[in-house]
Image (tube, rainbow, N blue to C red):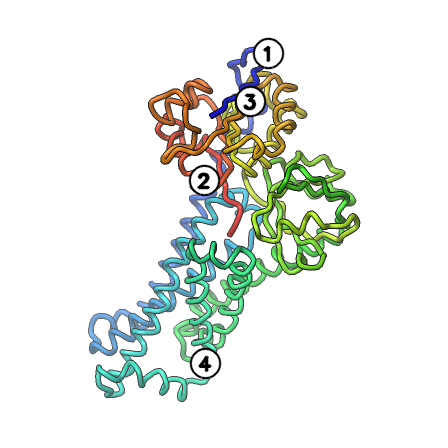
Amino acid sequence: MATQTHRARRPAPRRDPPEVRRTGPRERRWRARVGDLLELTALAGLLLVVALFLRDGGSLDLTTGSWSERLVAVGRVTGLVAVNLLLLQLLLAARLPWVDRVYGNDRALKAHRVLGRVTVPLVLVHVEALVVGYAARDGLSASTGWAVEPFRMLRDVPDMLTANAATALLVVIAVTSVRAAVRAVGYERWHLVHLTAYAAVALAVPHQLSTGSDLSASPTVRIYWVGLYVITAGAVIWWRVAVPVFRSIHHRLRVDQVVMEGPDTWSVWVSGRNLAQLDARAGQYLNWRFLAPGLWAFAHPWSLSRRPDGHRLRLTVRDLGDHSRALAELRPGTRVLIEGPYGAFTSRRRTRSRVLLIAAGIGVTPVRALLEEMVRDHAAEPGAVTVLYRADTEDQLVLRDEVVTLARRGGHRCHLLTGLPVPGSWFPAGMRGSDDADRLRLLVGDPRSQDVYVCGPAVWMDLVRRSLRRAGVPPAQIHAERFTW
């Protein structure tokens, strides 16, 4: 284990800079209120869907109908709720800027995953309840009806084939979204499969909005569903297609140069025009698509590794087997398409004058950009920032010299923590302290007085956040995001 400390020359001040006092708490309150309002709006939409179903005869079917009618009613209402949740997922994935700012990518990703885990089971309940209910209603036996009825429905319902195709796509998406499956198939293949969610919704539309369906039971119901479909489709087309294409063309982004930062790490410099209009901030990331052989088909979420200066952008990537090695072969002049900037991992979330930046491995890239912003823009007074940079070995400390130089220039402290990992701990072996929370206090003092930014591997970040909570750091002062959907 090796711990290298680069100390500030001046002690940390105890007063909050005016900018932090003025904007930090206000930003936090605004985000909390709008976030709560968004969640209440989504819940109100679900309740409205169920209420309209019950009003239009569903309550009678559920309470006084035969058992087959009750099964059909369960299938109908679960289908309605599943469609509503699926459209909410697509709205989250549309990456509306104000939603991204309120939720942050990490919170939106969690909501997206939770909705996915609920939506697909509801779709399966919807299908099976209808099949069994219709089979019973048609007088088929319980032992064979579930197998025979789907073929009868295909024959009698014109849009059932596309509905079944949509269901199959949703099941495939759910199976491949399991963490182990994502690791097995790789990010690029997983992302391509995930994009078929749009096809699933398109295939299901004829079935959902056909005459006699629950989505067209009354003018009020039809207005609600058509409106929700139009809003969702408009958001996806505008923010995931039109805006990225316009920005990429307007800024004329091209590869400027590729610099090797280590044996398996490269920085790509991208130049363009009017980059200040992009309004990118330190700590954010973009989805990058390089128009080069082997790379043009995939967009990757990579963080900015330097504070945007309005002239050039830099991303730093480690070879992780997901086409990142191909970046080393990029030629100057290669065209670049982008989506974003995304993420709320920025200094706008600060609530305190003192800041603790914790990074591991390639997770140092947004942390390094934040540190540069605080130093060059004088957003933190000398000694107010502490950097903890974790890696197994010293040669894995990507951008080490830049981080250390920036910390010294701003009068801040930087601890380089190297050594093999210890099970259940995010510190290397040999650190003093009874647990991670105690080790943290020994290094940085009282973490409760600091805003904490954390970026690194997912499992490692979970350990860091656990130790921060044990140390008493309020959740509003812990800022961490995962950058992949």
Residue mark closest to the camera, 1 vs 2: 1
Residue drawn at x 47%, y 61% is 87
Residue drawn at x 61%, y 53% is 323
Residue at label 3? 414
Question: Residue 316 vs residue 182: left or right?
Answer: right
* Residue 275 x, y percent position in the rendering: 74, 42
- Badge 4 or badge 2: first in the primary sequence: 2
User: Residue 33 — which label?
Assistant: 2
- Badge 3 or badge 4: first in the primary sequence: 4
What kind of residue is marked 4?
Answer: Leu
Q: For the residue labelled by badge 4, is the local secondary structure a helix, a strand or a loop?
A: helix
For the residue pair 331 and 298, the one nearer the viewer reads as: 331
Residue 453 against residue 137 in the figure, above or below: above
- Badge 3 or badge 2: first in the primary sequence: 2
Question: Residue 255 vs residue 261: left or right?
Answer: right
For the residue pair 209 and 252, the one nearer the viewer reads as: 252
Q: CA distance from mark 3 to mark 4?
A: 61 Å
User: Residue 161 — which label?
Assistant: 4
Q: CA distance from mark 4 to mark 2?
A: 44 Å
Residue 316 figure quarter: top right
Q: For the residue labelled by badge 1, is the local secondary structure a helix, a strand or a loop?
A: loop
* Residue 305 x, y percent position in the rendering: 64, 37
